[in-house]
Image (cartoon, rainbow, N blue to C red):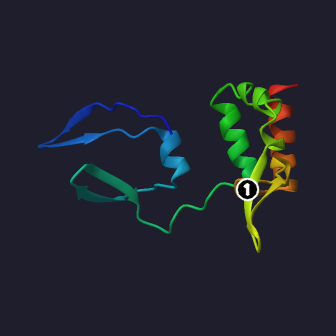
Amino acid sequence: MATVKLKIARIGNSRGVRLPAASLRRYRIGESVLMEERSEGILLRPTGPVVQKLSWEDTAHEMAAAGENWLAWDATAADGFDELPWPRPGRRGWRSRKVRLGDKVGSLTKDEAAALRRIITEMYGE
């Protein structure tokens, strides 16, 4: 999410800001918002239920729309990091074992990671 500088407009004796339409749609904000005054600033949030998290596919599409360059990640695939011996606790102390990053990436399963790679490849090409 990008930081956006908004102008303060005079509305009668009060002041207000105009929120971008894309942000209003993303957070499903209709006619009203809840405002919280916090020590670090003002927080505006929808009055309805919490916004549902994006699926992995929706996240990949939003990342592609943002125009970020993810090609630098390809260089990490050839760095040999996945073949390094990593210590693991065992009955007889620490033993070394090979770890393959393809088995689980963050909280993604192997199938989810493959689907995400496929979507990103479709968007950015090889």
Q: Residue at x 49, y 44 (%)?
A: 23
Left or right: 11 with respect to 21? left
The picture places residue 72, in percent across and down from the top left corner, at: 71, 25
Q: Which residue is mark 1?
A: 87
Q: In the image shown, does 18 or 3 lie closer to the viewer?
A: 3
Q: Nearer the viewer, residue 9 or 104?
A: 104
Relative side of 37 to 80, left or right: left
- Give me the residue at 46% from left, 55% from top: 29
Q: Nearer the viewer, residue 94 or 81?
A: 94
The residue under label 1 is which amino acid type? Pro
Q: Of 117 and 67, which appears nearest the observer?
A: 117
Q: Residues within 10 Å of mark 1 (few under 14, many from 20)?
A: few
In the image, residue 66 lies at what x, y percent?
Answer: 62, 31
Residue 69 picture quarter: top right
Q: Is residue 94 above or below residue 124?
A: below
Residue furthest to the left in view is 13
* 45 left or right, relative to 79: left
- Taking the spot 51% from the left edge, 66% from the top edge, the residue there is 50
Quarter placement of the C terminus? top right
Horizontal side of 23 relative to 33 (left or right) equals right
Q: Residue furthest bottom?
A: 91
**Residue at 79% from the left image edge and 28% from the top image edge:** 74
Q: Quadrant of residue 93?
A: bottom right
Q: Secondary structure at mark 1?
A: strand
Residue furthest front in the image: 92
